[in-house]
Amino acid sequence: MNNDESDFRDFFAASGPALRRSAYLIVHDWQVAEDLTQQAMAKVYARWARIAPGARRAYARRVVVNESLSHQRRHRPELPVAEIPERAAESSDSTFDPEALLAVLPAQQRAILALRFFEDVSVKETARLLGVAEGTVKSQTARATTTLRAHLLVEPIEDIT
Amino acid sequence: MNDQDVASLFAERVRATEPPWALDPGEAVRVGSRMRVTRRRYVALASAAAVVAAVVTITPMARWLFDGDSNTSAPVASSLLGAMTLSSETAHAGDVIELRFPSDNERGVAFSLSQPRGGDWTPVYFLVSDWGVPDKYAPTWWSAEGSEDRGWPQVLITGTGPDRVIVPDSAVPGDYLLCTANAADKECAQLIVTR
């Protein structure tokens, strides 16, 4: 095994789970997320020698997000959903169904959630990765978290100022 | 509870549903390696197409860059000269010459060798360097004419070199312009082939 392959295997083990999680948030199917992550990792390895070590995670993240959004466009055209399917009154840790909740969110909001809160990517970088304005990232983040809050039965704190 | 807290709670719930990690890095390595080979093939074909396109477009460019309409060498745009230097500005057909670059230079292994024709610099040969690894690769060349089915490997070379190229055996004496043919920034140097 050469150094490149050894480095890549370390990277795969360290970054793979988080990348799969990001893919899952976008496609809301663990099996598909796994396939997309494997596919994305192969693409990363194909260019491994050309990617600066410090940029590998960002590159992999970009590939995973692009693959996931492309998959979503090809296989599950987005249909607007008027209301959240379940109110959280019935929701508990044991019955929590993230797929049902994710199905309510548009793909772009899911991608923003994945990047902002699972990958800890800045608003600016998220905007660059998704090709949208920073304002869009902020407004979509607010909408997504409002939906999450409602589903998770967490009341927003009232603004007392 | 702010947005971050809501997202953290959601992340926690998502993680609770996450299946065990069982992806195989070996599979990614195998597929990635195949992608590299496939990409090289496509790039070689694309490069050959680019060469043809370059030949077609160089004529009006050369008219703009060079002054005069004789078959003798003409001034070359200063922006193209200087970064790439030759071990010798004169050479015989069949000679190997060394090319050197600034330390931050990035280039491929392909070069064009052009002659002045009717006031234009026209590529007459394409040269492939030894990749800067003379023990492993030998420099080669082919004529620009009928080169549609030829291509060079897509290799990124960095640093000062030297990259070695061979002056084609069939190169007739005269003035030539040697340029990078597969680099983001085109660099050129003038070469005189003598008898």
Image (cartoon, rainbow, N blue to C red):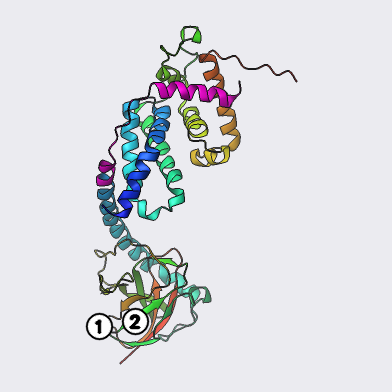
Residue B100 lies left or right of residue B78; in this view the side is: left
User: The C terminus of chain A appears in which quarter of the rendering?
Assistant: top right
Q: Is residue B161 above or below residue A66?
A: below
Residue A62 place in picture, x, y as percent:
44, 41
Q: Residue at x 42, y 37 (%)?
A: A65
Q: What segment is highlighted magenta in the picture? A: B1-30
Residue A155 place in picture, x, y as percent:
60, 14
- Viewer-closest of A78 and A15: A15
Disc 1 from disc 2: Cα separation:
13 Å
- Viewer-closest of B188 and B115: B188
Q: Is residue B6 above or below residue B166?
A: above
Q: Is residue B185 visible?
A: yes
Residue B119 lies left or right of residue A148; in this view the side is: left
Q: Earlier in the sequence, mark 1 or mark 2?
A: 2
Residue B86 place in picture, x, y as percent:
41, 81
Q: Residue at x 56, y 33 (%)?
A: A137
Residue A66 place in picture, x, y as percent:
41, 38
Q: Is residue A53 above or below residue A16?
A: below
- Viewer-closest of B193 and A129: A129
Q: Is residue B132 above or below residue B116?
A: above
Question: Is label 1 in a helix, a strand or a loop?
Answer: loop
Circle 1 crowding by C-alpha within 10 Å: few under 14, some 14–19, many from 20: few
**Which amino acid type is shown beneath numbered disc 1?**
Asp
Q: Which of the labelled discs sits on residue B118, or is there none? A: none
- Residue annotated with mark 2: B97
Residue B3 lies left or right of residue A78; in this view the side is: right
On whether residue B24 falls in the magenta region, the answer is yes
Q: Is residue A69 visible?
A: no
Q: Are marks 1 and 2 on the same chain?
A: yes
- Residue annotated with mark 1: B169
- Viewer-closest of A68 and B42: A68
Q: Does the magenta stretch mainly form a helix, a strand or a loop?
A: helix
